[in-house]
Amino acid sequence: MTYIAISDDNRKRIKIKRTEGTSSTRQYVYDSSNAWVNLTGSSIVYRPPANFTAVVYEFNSVFGYSAKYVPNSLMLRLRIGDSTSSLGDVTSNNEKYIVSYGGTTGGVRANWSYPINLTFRIESSDWPVDSNGIIKEQTIMSQCKGYLAGYTANVNVTTPTHNVYLNYSPFIIVYSV
């Protein structure tokens, strides 16, 4: 576990989680059904303090691919819910909570690694409360899917050369402002 000291009077209830990078955290995103899957190492349980303005969720990892002539692509979205089995969109159609990496055109053999530095701000008006108006503890998690059929994206791993994979330890920082 790595701890980071942040001295900023505006950040409250800072929570940090790091997942050790191993072959089991390496995630291959290839799904011909185009389904979203939970992103390994991106889940954290959090409850903001009273009178917060927003929750900031930062997920840091890498996205690598090693494809013959076609770069792979990856979509990521943020979800929240009571648990990982009950995740839902933050807003209608999850507007402002979906990003894409990679390309969709052919070319030369691609061996790349991109940093994933997701930062999402969840406004207090979008954070769930119970029937008594009490702020709920929620699981915050990223999900991913490939969007270029026939190729595999690699998350939590770098690919410096074809068929060489180096594990990466993803981490999350979440706090309230």
Image (cartoon, rainbow, N blue to C red):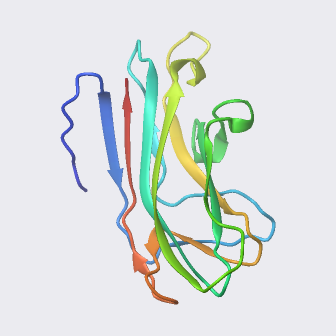
Looking at this view, name the residue that lies furthest to the front.
Answer: 107
Work out whether 97 lies above or below 12. Answer: below
When asked about the image quadrant of residue 174, the answer is: top left
- In the displayed structure, 168 sits above or below 80; it is below
**Residue 68 position in % (x across, y down):** 65, 87
Q: Residue at x 60, y 86 (%)?
A: 109
Does residue 119 show up?
Answer: yes
Of 142 and 85, the residue lying toward us: 142
Relative placement, left or right, of 71 versus 35 is left
Residue drawn at (54%, 46%) of the image = 141
Give the residue at x 52% y 40%: 139
Q: Position of residue 48 (x, y in %)?
A: 41, 25
- In screen coordinates, is 35 left or right of 163? right
Quadrant where the C terminus sits is: top left
- Quarter of the figure that contains the N terminus: bottom left
* Most foreground residue, 108 or 102: 108
Instruction: Find residue 116 and report its horizontal and vertical position in percent.
Output: 47, 57
Which of the two residues, 79 or 10, is positioned nearer the viewer here?
10
- Residue at image position (23%, 22%) is 9
